Image (cartoon, helix red, strand yellow):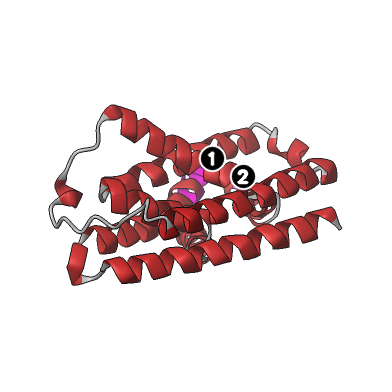
């Protein structure tokens, strides 16, 4: 029992170490919550967690090891780097052309998101993970180590690892969603644009770094 608790909280701490680092997921959460409200952060995290559930199941069945291939990692890295550059450019374009604005309606976080938007946010949450090469690297390194320890306790051990890991994503990104959807008390248009510009610059940095790391 103690081992399972250690697996759960260990996975949570490691999950926070990845979630807290600015990247595509954070940028997507900020822009989506500003436009559609708090619950978009939940569905983005849900899409991300469903993708990671598939990875855990694949690992449990012994399939994930086939992704440990330098050619596959290089292709994913190059495509991911290019996509991150595009995402950064698109954000800057939207900000300076005033196509994206922060909705400071205090009641925004109380509005319901229809099924169509829910599915779209879930899909985006999965895609931003798929285009991040470090997500693959993490799973065939740190994730693999956790899984090896977890499978010793069969399904309950793997479940403890998975729940601990995704809880970090839900806690962090929904907290960010809450801050943004709270409106003027925490955010304003200037702060929002500044954060988006910083995120875009960081995406440029990540994209260039991905291309340099995986081309060389």
Q: Position of residue 138 (x, y in %)?
A: 65, 54
- The residue indicated by pointer 2 is 131
Label drawn at residue 138: none
- The residue indicated by pointer 1 is 127
Q: Are marks 2 and 1 in contact (CB under 8 Å)?
A: yes
User: Which type of secondary structure does the marked residue at label 2 adopt?
Assistant: loop
Q: Position of residue 2 (x, y in %)?
A: 46, 60
In this rendering, does residue 4 appear at all?
no
Q: Residue furthest right?
A: 216
Q: Report whether 163 appears left or right of 72.
A: left
Q: Position of residue 32 (x, y in %)?
A: 36, 49
If the image is split into quadrants, where does the N terminus sit? bottom left
Residue drawn at point x = 14 percent, y = 57 percent? 106
Q: Residue furthest left?
A: 107
If the image is split into quadrants, where does the C terminus sit? bottom right
Q: CA distance from mark 2 to mark 1?
A: 6 Å
Q: Report whether 144 appears left or right of 52.
A: right
Q: Report whether 160 appears left or right of 186.
A: right
């Amino acid at each position: 029992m103690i081992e399972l608790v250690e697996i759960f909280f260990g996975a949570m701490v490691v999950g926070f170490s990845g979630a807290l680092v600015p990247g595509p997921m954070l940028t997507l959460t900020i822009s989506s919550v500003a436009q559609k409200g708090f619950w978009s952060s939940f569905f983005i995290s849900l899409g991300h967690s469903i993708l990671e559930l598939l990875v855990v199941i694949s690992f449990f069945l012994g399939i994930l090891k086939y992704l440990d291939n330098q050619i596959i990692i290089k292709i994913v890295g190059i495509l991911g780097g290019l996509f991150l550059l595009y995402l950064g450019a698109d954000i800057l374009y939207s900000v300076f052309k005033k196509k994206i604005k922060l909705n400071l309606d205090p009641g925004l976080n109380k509005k319901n998101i229809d099924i169509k938007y829910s599915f779209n946010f879930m899909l985006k949450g999965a895609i931003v993970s798929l285009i991040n090469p470090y997500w693959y690297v993490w799973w065939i390194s740190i994730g693999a180590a956790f899984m090896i320890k977890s499978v010793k306790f069969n399904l309950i051990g793997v479940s403890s690892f998975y729940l601990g890991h995704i809880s970090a994503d839900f806690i962090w990104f929904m907290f960010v969603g809450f801050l943004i959807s709270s409106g003027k008390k925490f955010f304003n248009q200037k702060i929002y644009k500044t954060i988006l510009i910083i995120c875009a610059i960081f995406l440029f940095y990540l994209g260039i770094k991905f291309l340099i790391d995986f081309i060389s």
